[in-house]
Image (cartoon, rainbow, N blue to C red):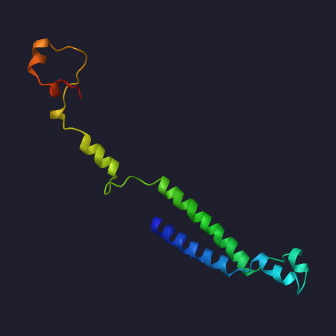
Amino acid sequence: MEIFVWAAHVLLAVVLIILVLLQHGKGADMGAAFGSGSAGSLFGASGSANFLSRATSMTAALFFATSMGLTYLSANQTKDTGMTSIMDQIEESAVAPVGQQKKPVVGNDTDDSDISSKSKADQIPE
């Protein structure tokens, strides 16, 4: 389903670009208004919407609909177990096995004779 929506979204984007580039701009008649042709075309009524502008508006509406559909699909997708993110891999490698976990050092609950026999590196709490 998601692949179909992606394909339609890309196709609509290409069609929308083509339709916008094919249309006649509103500022294109300004050169004809100053010096030759009809001056009424500069500020006159733009006329009814032709085929290209209606096709552009329909394509844009469908493009927005596919955008919303892709947003909905991405928000409601289940987590795929095949691929994991880099952060998940780092968190999994940082967790030590149960047998190798050390007891955290809290306060000075060790006796002084034990401290003198340990090196400085062993006395640093983790």
Quarter of the image where one finds residue 32:
bottom right
Residue 73, image x and y in percent? Answer: 49, 58
Residue in view at x 64 percent, y 72 percent? 59
Direction from residue 103 to residue 23 in the image, left or right: right
* Quarter residue 121 falls in: top left
Identify the residue at image location x=91%, y=81%.
Answer: 39
> Total label count?
0
Q: Residue furthest left?
A: 117
Residue found at the very far bottom of the displayed protein: 36
Can residue 14 be seen?
yes
Q: Quadrant of residue 114?
A: top left
Residue 109 image offset from top left, x and y in percent: 20, 13
Q: Is residue 30 above or below residue 100?
A: below
Give the percent coordinates (x, y) of residue 37. Answer: 88, 87
Q: Is residue 16 left or right of residue 126?
A: right
Above or below: residue 37 compared with residue 11: below
Q: Quadrant of the C terminus?
A: top left
In the picture, measured across the screen, residue 103 lies left or right of residue 7, that is left
The percent coordinates of residue 43 (x first, y second) are 88, 74
The residue at 67%/72% (across/down) is 58
Residue 1 visible in rendering: no
Q: Is residue 88 above or below residue 48?
A: above
**Residue under the point 66% across and 76% down:** 20
